[in-house]
Amino acid sequence: MTKEVMGLGHRRKRVEDARFLRGKGNYIDDFKLPGMLHLDIVRSPYAHAKIKSINGEKAMEIPGVLAVIDGKLLQQYNVHNMPTLMSDVQNVLPIDTVKYQYQEVAAVLATDRYIAADGVAAVEVDYEPLPVMVDPKKALHPGAMKVREDKESNHIWHWEWGNREATDADIRAAEVVVKEDIYIPRIHVSSIETCGCVAKWDSVDGHLTLWMTTQAPHAIRTVVALITSHLGLSEEKIRVISPDIGGGFGGKVPAYPGYVIAVAASIVTGAPVKWIEDRTENLAADSFGRDYHITAELAGKRDGTLTSLRIKTIADHGYTDAAANPSKFPAGLFHICTGSYDLKNAFVEVDGVYTNKPPGGIAYRCSFRVTEAVHTIERMADLYAHDIGMDPAEFRMKNFIKPEQFPYKSALGWEYDSGDYHSALRLAMDMISYEELRKEQKEKRARGEFMGIGISSFTEIVGAGPSKHFDILGLKMFDSCEIRIHPTGKAIARFGTKSQGQGHETTYAQIIAEELGIPADHIKVEEGDTDTAPYGLGTYASRSTPTAGAAAAIASRKVREKARKIAAHLLEAAEEDLVWEQGKFFVKGSPNQVKTIQEIAFAAYTNHPQGMEAGLEAVNYYDPPNLTYPFGSYIAVVDIDRGTGEVKVRRFVAVDDCGVRINPMIVEGQIHGGLTMGFAPALMEEIQYDENGNIFGSTFMDYLLPTAVETPNWELGETVTPSPHHPIGAKGVGESATVGAPAAIANAVVDALWHLGVRHIDIPIKPSKVWELLNAHGAAEYK
Amino acid sequence: MSTHTIHITVNGALHTVEVDSRLLLVHFLRENLNLTGTHIGCDTTSCGACTVQVNGVPLKSCTMFAVQADGAEVKTVEGLAQNGKLHPLQEGFYEKHGLQCGFCTPGMLMTSAALLESNPNPTEEEIRWGISGNLCRCTGYVNIVKAVQYAAEKMQQEKGGGHD
C-alpha cells in the first residue's frame, strides 16, 4: 500500500498522541459530573481478624460525610459478595472477618475526596486478630488453620495435564535428570494510573452508566447485569465506558470491590459517585501476578538430547481465587511449559491454595501464566546445558523444534502454528557477537571478574481463543469489528477490545486501510463504549491483534464483497470479471473501466442496485481457529560488581518474531516496554509478606519500578514467520518481551557465577542476594 | 478548616482564589482549574506523573500545598504549546513514539522541558538521570530519551537560526 494509504508495515505516527501530548486525555479521574460524590475505603490493618464492630458515628459527624457503608448494609441488597472470574467468591465488603491486610472493611461517601478521607480516618473498627496463614506449603498441611470457613481446606483445586505414566517412566530411565525448585514471586503490574470509576445511576429512567478503568468493558457489563438482576437492573440499562486507560497489563481485567460499592452508592443516593484508588490500595489490594512455587525436572541423554519434563507447582491465590484465566484452565496456559523444545513426554500439575493475602492472580503483562512456564523451561534448559558442559546456545539449537516440523503438536497437546527458532537465535548470536563474548568471559573469569551471558529462546501462546476451549464465565473468547463506510468513502470502525496504550486507534485503521484502500487517516477507530461497540472480550493476553485485528480484516473483506457487487452494477460487468487492486475494482483486461472504493461507497448511498440493501458496512465476530505462537531469542550480557553484588545489564539483544508487523514503530515500542517489564521482576520487583501477613511493597518507595537509569538500552532484531491461520499473518506482540526477558537475565547471572558452584537464583536477583552468594563462596570484595 | 487566599499564575493567567490550607497543588490544578493534564500516580513523590514547573523548577505537585505556590508562576502541560504550535518536546515525543498510554507523558514533558532549559545539549546519560524521577511503565524509556534528544537538537537549531 502507498504511503498515503498507510496500510500494513508503515511506521504510521500515532493518532492518540494528539490529545495525550496536550494534556487532553480522558482518564477516569478527569471525569467530573455535577453533584458527584466521592467514595473512599476503610481497609484492614490485619491480615486475618474478626470484625467485632464498625462504628461510623464519628465519621458521620464530619460535615460533608453522607454515609458509612459496611458489609451488613450491602447484605440487605445481597451485593456484599461478588463472583470472581474463576467462579470463587470475593467479599465486596466483609460481614464479620477480614482475610488479608488492606482488605476493604467499610466505605465512606462524602461530598469531596478530602472529606471522604477524613471520614475513613474517623470510622472506628474493633478487630480481634486471628492466626495468619501466609505460607502456601504450610497451608496444605493436614489440620492447617483454614483461611476460608466456607471451604473444607485451603486446597482450592488440583489441575494436571499430560501423560504422567510415560513421563515418570522416562525420568526413571533417563541418563540425565536436572531438578530445581524455582519460586516466581508475587509481583504487581503497577500501571501508573491506578484503578477507579464513576458510577452514575439515573433514577428517572433506571439506567446505570459506569465509566471505569477496565480492559474488558463488555464482559463487565454482563457481569454487572448478572449480579444485579435481582435489583431490576437489566443489561440494556447498563452502559460501561472504558475511557483512556493509563496502562493495564492485566491489572484492569478483574472487577474490584470499589467498583461495586460505587455502583451501589450511586443507586442508593441517586448521585454520581467517583472512586479512585491511591497507590497503596492499588499495590496492596488489587490482583497480583505470579506467586508460583515450582519444582521442575528435565530429563534427557548425556549428549544433550532432551526427552521429558515434569513440573509440580503450588499456586498461592490469596484468600480467593480471583485469577483471570479462561474457565477451563485454572493454571492458565502454563502447559506451554515445554517451550521451544521437541520433547517426547511431559506432565504438569498445579495445586491452587488459599492464604491470607490479596486475591489473584492475574497475568503481569503475559498471556495466562505463560511467563511462569517460559521462565521455568528456560532456566531448566540452561541448567541442563551447564550440567552436561554444553554451550547453552548449542544445546538449544540441538533441541529446538525444527522449522519443517510446523505445525507442531507439543507433548502437552498444543498445536504450534509456525516457527523458525534456529534463525531467531542465530540472528541474536550474530547481533551480540556471541562467540567473542564467550572468549571475553573466559579471560575475565581468569582475572576474577564476573561476567555472564544468558539466553532465553521463548515460545508464547497468545490470542485466546478458539471458542471450543476458551471462555470466561461462559462468554466465548471471540472478538469483533464493525465497519461502516460513509458516503464519501471515509469510515468508522468499532471494536470489542480496549487499548491501554497499545495504539489501536492507529494500527486497526492500518489493517482496514490495507484491505480496503481507504487511507488510514480517514478511518476513525472507536472502542470501549458498550452502547456502541460490538461485543468482545477485551484487551489482555496479547489477544487484540489475533482476534479483533483478524475481525478487522474479515469485516473489511465482507465490505469488499458488497463493494464488488456495487462495482459490477456501476461498470455493467459481471462480478467475476472484476479485479480488486489497492482500493479499486477494474474490469479484467480493461484497466480504464474502474471504480474506486470511494466511488463505490458513494453509490452505496446514492445509486445502489435495485434489490440490494443500501449502505456499505459489515461486522465480524472472529472466532480464531487456533492460538498464535510468537517466539524469539534474547541474549543478555551482565557484569557483576563484587563489592555490591549489583547486576549490570551491559547489553541486551532481543530478536522477536511476532509474524507480520502491522506498524513496526509500535511493535518496537511494545517490545521496549515489555523488555522493561521483564527486566523489572528479574532484578527489582517483588511483593513480600511477613509472618503476620504484613505487606512489604505497598508504595513505590519499597516496590521498585525501573527508572531510565537502570533500564538497559534495548537492541532489537526481527524475523518474520507469519501465522498461517491469521488473516494477515500477525501473531500479537504486547507481552512477548515480558515473558522472555526474565530468564535471559537470570541465566546470565547464574552463568556468571556457575564456576563458584551457583546453580540457581530466584528472581528478583537483588544485589543483596548476589553479594551473599559471592561472600559465601569467598568471592565478595569488601568495599 | 482554615483557608488562605492565594495569588497564583498558571500558564500565564493570574488566579486569586481562597483555598483550603491542606489542598494539594495537584488538586488545585485538576479540580479548581480543570487542568486535568497533570496526573496523580503514587502519592509518595515517586512516579512524577504530577510534575509541573513552579517558577521554572520541575516539582511534584502531589507533595506540595497550593498555598506554597502563593505568588508563584506555575506551568503545566497545557501551557507547553505556544499559539497552537507544539513545543519541540511534544513534537519529539510524537516523532519518536515516546509515549504509549500517555499517563506519565505530561510529567515527562515538564521534567524534560526544565532539563533542556538548564542543559540545552544533554548527553544520553544526563537525559536518563534527568528523567529518573519520572516513572513510565509502557515505553522502556528508550524512545523517551530519543524524543528529548530530538527536541534538544531542534531547539538548538531554532536558537542558532536566529543568529545566522
Image: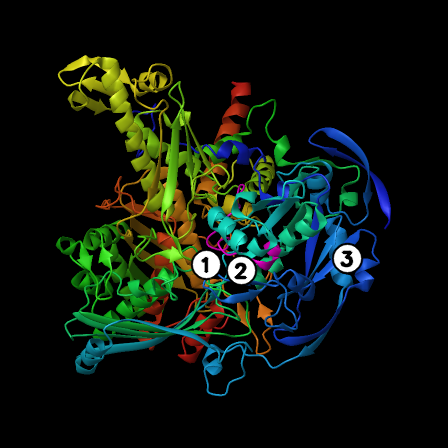
Q: In the image, A661: left or right of A578?
A: right
Observer-nearest of A388 and A584: A584
Give the label on residue B2, or none. none
Q: Is residue A658 magenta?
A: no
* Residue A594 makes an appearance in the image: yes
Q: Quadrant of residue B119?
A: top right
Q: Give whichever of discs 1 and 2 has the lower sequence position.
A: 1
Q: Give whichever of discs 3 and 1 has the lower sequence position.
A: 3
- Give the label, 2 or 3, closer to the camera: 3
Residue tagged 3:
A118
Observer-nearest of A491 and A296: A491
Q: Secondary structure at mark 1?
A: helix
Residue type at mark 1: give it.
Ala
Q: Give whichever of discs 2 and 3 has the lower sequence position.
A: 3
Q: What predominant SS class does the magenta segment belong to?
A: loop
Question: Which residue is at 42% across, 62% downward?
Answer: A682
Q: CA gap, disc 1 to disc 2?
A: 8 Å
* Residue A745 makes an appearance in the image: no
Residue tagged 1:
A680
- Whether discs 1 and 2 lie on one chain: the answer is yes
Label 2, residues with CA under 10 Å away: few <14, some 14-19, many ≥20: some
Please state the chain letter of the residue tagged with numbered disc 1 in the rendered image. Answer: A
Give the label on residue A704, or none. 2
Give the image location of residue A764, x and y in percent. 45, 66
Q: Are marks 1 and 2 in contact (CB under 8 Å)?
A: yes
Label 1, residues with CA under 10 Å away: few <14, some 14-19, many ≥20: many
